[in-house]
Amino acid sequence: MKTDSSKSNLPDKSHATIELLRELVAHLRQHRTELREEWARRITEAKLLTAMSKDEIFAEATSVYDNYVEALETGTFEALQAYARNLSERIIPRGVQTDEVVGIVLLLRDVLARSLFAKYQTDFNLLNRILDAYEPAANRIANTVAVGFVQERERIIRQQQEAIRELSTPVLPVRERLLILPIIGVIDPQRARQLTEQLLRGIRANRARVVVIDITGVAAIDSHVANHLVQTVEASRLLGATVIVTGLSPEIAQTLVNIGVDLGKMNTVGDLQGGIEEAERLLGYKVAPIQDSAHQVVVAS
Amino acid sequence: MSKIKVEACVSVASDTDIVNARRQGRALADHIGFSSSEATLIATAISELARNIVHYARDGEILVGMVNGDSCPGISITARDSGPGIPELKRVMLEGFSTSGGMGLGLPGVRRIMDEFNIESQVGKGTTVTAIKWKR
Amino acid sequence: MAVPILKQSHYLIATIQAALTDADLVELRDALVARVGKFRSRGVIVDVTALDVLDSFASRTLRDIACMIRLRGAETVIVGIQPEVAFTMVQMGITLEDVPTVLDLEEGLAHLERKSRH
Ligand SMILES: Nc1ncnc2c1ncn2[C@@H]1O[C@H](COP(=O)(O)OP(=O)(O)OP(=O)(O)O)[C@@H](O)[C@H]1O
Ligand SMILES: [Mg+2]
C-alpha cells in the first residue's frame, strides 16, 4: 500500500485558473529576454548578490527564470527545488545571505507582476483574475526557493560542525592493536554518541584489541553520559576489544556507581601512563630489562 | 503529533516477513537520510516488533512512514495486530519479562532505542505499537 | 542449509552470508551442535560479518549455540559484529555477556588456538 499525500502539485485548480496560467506562461515565454534583463538589472540596482559578477547574475537569473516559468506551467516544483538546492550549494560558500535570495525571488515576482499590469491594464477584470491565478503560484515558488536555500545553509553549517567535532575527538592508534581515545571537555549526549561511533569504527579499521579511554580531561558527566560510557565499553567488547578507562575523577566514579555500574568489573587504571602499560601487558608485550644496558625496552613476547 | 505519511505496509505472518519488514524500514531510513547506525537501530526495532506479532499474535502488519516533527523529519513504525492483546502492559515494559522464555528485551529495548514509543493493547482485541525516531 | 559450515581441522566455521530468518538461525544452531559431536570439534566460529541486524532473537540463539557447544566440551567464538550492530545491541540491552566475541575470522582462530593450548 502506498499513500501519497504530499505530491507537490498546486492545490486543485479550476479549469479557468489553468487557462489563465497558460496565458500567463505564454506571456512570460514571449517576453523572456526583456523580463530577464529587467530582473537582472533590478537585482544589481538593489545591491543584491554583490558577491557575484554581472554575467554570473544574468546566467543564474536565466536559469531561475526558466525554472520559474516551468513550475508555473506544470504546477510541479521538483525541478525548481532541485535547482534551488544546487544554486544554494554554489552560492552559499561565496557568502550569499538568506535575505538576498529571498530578495531576488520577490523582485522577480514584482517584475513579472508589473509586466502583467502593463499588458492587461485595459482589461481590469481580466488583470484581476490573472493576478489571482498568479499570486498563489508565485508565493509557492518564492517559498520553495527560500526554503531550499535555508535548508541547504543549515546542512552546510551542520557539516562544518561535524567536521569540527571530528577534529576535537581523535582516536589515536599509538601502536599496533592499541587505540587511545583522550576525551577532553564537556560531553553532551550527542558528542558521546559520536565518540562511540568513531571509536567503534576505529577499532575495526585498526584491528584494535585494546582501547584506552582517558577521561582525565572531563570534569563531570551526567547519568546519561555515564550510561553511554558503559555502553561503549560493552560495544567495544562485542568487536573484540578490551577497554581500559583511565583518569576517572572521584565525581565521575560516583556517578557511575550511582547508575549501578560495578566499578570492579570495569577495567579502570589511575592515569593514562598506567593505562598504556596495562594495555601493553594485555597485548602480550612486556617491559623487560636488557643486560648490559641501563635502558628498558619493550619487547613482544 | 504530526501526520504520518505511510510509505510501506508489510503484512507479517512468518519469519521471512520479519526480514522483509526490516529491509523496507532500512530502505526508508536511508531515503530519509538517517546515518547507517541510526538505520540499524530502526531496522532492529522493526525486527523486534514484527517478531512479537508472529510469535504472539500470529499475524498483523508493520507500517513504516515519514513524519514531520517541529524541526526535523522522522521515521515512524507502527506494528499492529488483532491478536490476544497484552493483559499486563506495565509488566511487559519491564526488562526481563517474557511469557515465552525470551529475554524480554524486545519492547523495553525498542522503547530505549527509539525517541517516541506508544503501546496500546486490549485483551482479546489486539495490540498496536507506534514508535518514532527523529532525524536530528 | 542457509549457512555453510566448513570443517577446518579441529574447528567448524559457519559463515553467515545474508540476512537470516529465525528458522535459518535455529537450523544453524542444531546443525552446529550435531556436527561438533560428529567431528569432535574443539571449537566453533560463527562469522556474522554479513548481518546488519542482531536483534534479541538472533542474540539469544547465538548465546544458546555457545551454551550448547560448551556442554559438548567445545568453545564458541562470534566474529565480525559490525560497529553499528554492536552499538545497537548494547542500546537494546543485549550484551552477550558469556559469549566470546572477537574482531574477525583471523582473531577467531587465534582465540580458539589460545583456548585449546590451555
Ligand atoms: N503483539 C503482541 N501480542 C500479544 N502479546 C505480546 C505482543 N508483543 C509482546 N507481547 C507480550 O509481551 C511480552 C514481552 O515482549 P518482549 O518483546 O519485550 O519480550 P519477548 O518477546 O518475550 O522476548 P525477546 O523479545 O527478548 O525475545 C511477551 O513475552 C508477550 O507476552
Ligand atoms: Mg519480543
Image (spheres, grey):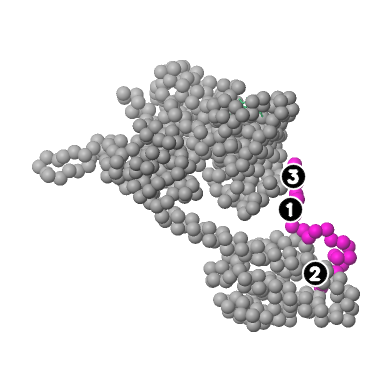
Q: Position of residue B136 (x, y in %)?
A: 57, 51
Q: Is residue A2 found inside the magenta-colored segment of the image?
A: yes
* Marks 3 and 1 belong to one chain: yes
Q: Which residue is mark 3?
A: A2
Image depth: mark 3 or mark 1 in front = 1
* Residue C65 is inside the magenta segment: no
Find the magenta span and give its range. Answer: A1-26
Q: Is C9 drawn above or below residue A68 in the view shown?
A: above
Q: Residue at x 30, y 45 (%)?
A: A272
N-terminal-most mark, 2 or 1: 1
Q: Secondary structure at mark 1?
A: loop
Which mark sits nearer the N-terminus, 3 or 2? 3
Q: Dot 1 falls on which chain?
A: A
Label 2 belongs to which residue?
A134
Position above or below: B94 against A146: above
Residue type at mark 1: give it. Answer: Ser
Between A62 and A155, the residue placed more toward the observer is A155
A109 on left or right of A299: right
Please name the residue shown 78% across and 79% down the image: A115
Residue type at mark 3?
Answer: Lys
For the residue with label 1, is its CB less than 8 Å from the closest atom of ligand 1?
no
Where is residue A12, by image quadrant?
Answer: bottom right
* Disc 2/disc 1 C-alpha distance (Å): 22 Å
Label 3: element kind: loop
Instruction: Say which amino acid is labelled 2.
Output: Tyr
Q: Residues within 10 Å of mark 2 (few under 14, many from 20)?
A: many
At horizontal 49% and vertical 47% (from top left) the residue drawn is A189
Residue A50 in view, yes or no:
yes
Q: Which mark is residue A6?
A: 1
Q: Specify whether A148 is left or right of A231.
A: right
Front in this rendered view, residue C86 or A125: A125
**How far, Cα to Cα, is label 3 from label 1?**
12 Å
